[in-house]
Amino acid sequence: MTVFSKIVAGEIPSYKVAEDDRYYAFLDINPLQWGHTLVIPKQETDYIFDLDDRTLADMQVFAKKVAMAIKAAIPCRKVGQAVLGLEVPHAHIHLVPLTSEGDMDFHKKISDPDPDKMKETAAMIAEQFEKE
Ligand code: AMP
């Protein structure tokens, strides 16, 4: 079971942003920016491009809704999207609020993010998601 499947199962905590029957969105624990969110399929597959077409396409549509909620909740110019998958073997899309190109630098993370601010950030995005 991947660490992300454990999050979906509620075995380890996460800063949840959104969920439906097939997808789950939560804050990255080492965010590049406040509001940096991961979108995952509940189905456990390592490599995103091994997902079947339908699961991948619907995941992108779910990620779009999450991105719109991030944009509404967090001051930014756009929400950027990236796929790495080098660390956790469970397909995921990174959504990062951007003001400039350098905001998507995976070597520059917020150090020791305040848990209260993480909780607050997740709640703000979740509230926007519910409005859509
Ligand atoms: P990558 O697989 O290269 O896309 O990186 C995995 C991402 O997952 C990193 O940005 C980590 O900070 C993030 N991550 C790892 N474990 C957790 C967790 N338990 N909760 C939230 N984010 C996590």
Image (cartoon, helix red, strand yellow):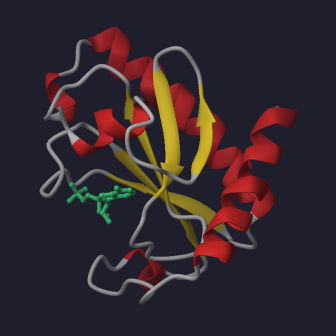
Q: Position of residue 56 (x, y in %)?
A: 34, 22
Q: Position of residue 90 (x, y in %)?
A: 22, 38
Residue located 39% across and 40% down the image: 7
Q: Is residue 100 above or below residue 54?
A: below
For residue 100, which quarter of the picture? Answer: bottom right
Residue located 47% across and 80% down the image: 103
Question: In the visual, does 131 lie left or right of 91?
Answer: right
In which quadrant will I find the N terminus? top left
Residue located 14% across and 34% down the image: 46
Ligand 1 is in which quadrant of the figure?
bottom left
Residue sitting at the far front: 11
Q: Is residue 18 above or below residue 94?
A: above
In which quadrant will I find the C terminus? top right
Q: Position of residue 5 (x, y in %)?
A: 30, 33
Residue located 78% across and 57% down the image: 124
Question: In the visual, does 124 lie left or right of 87?
Answer: right
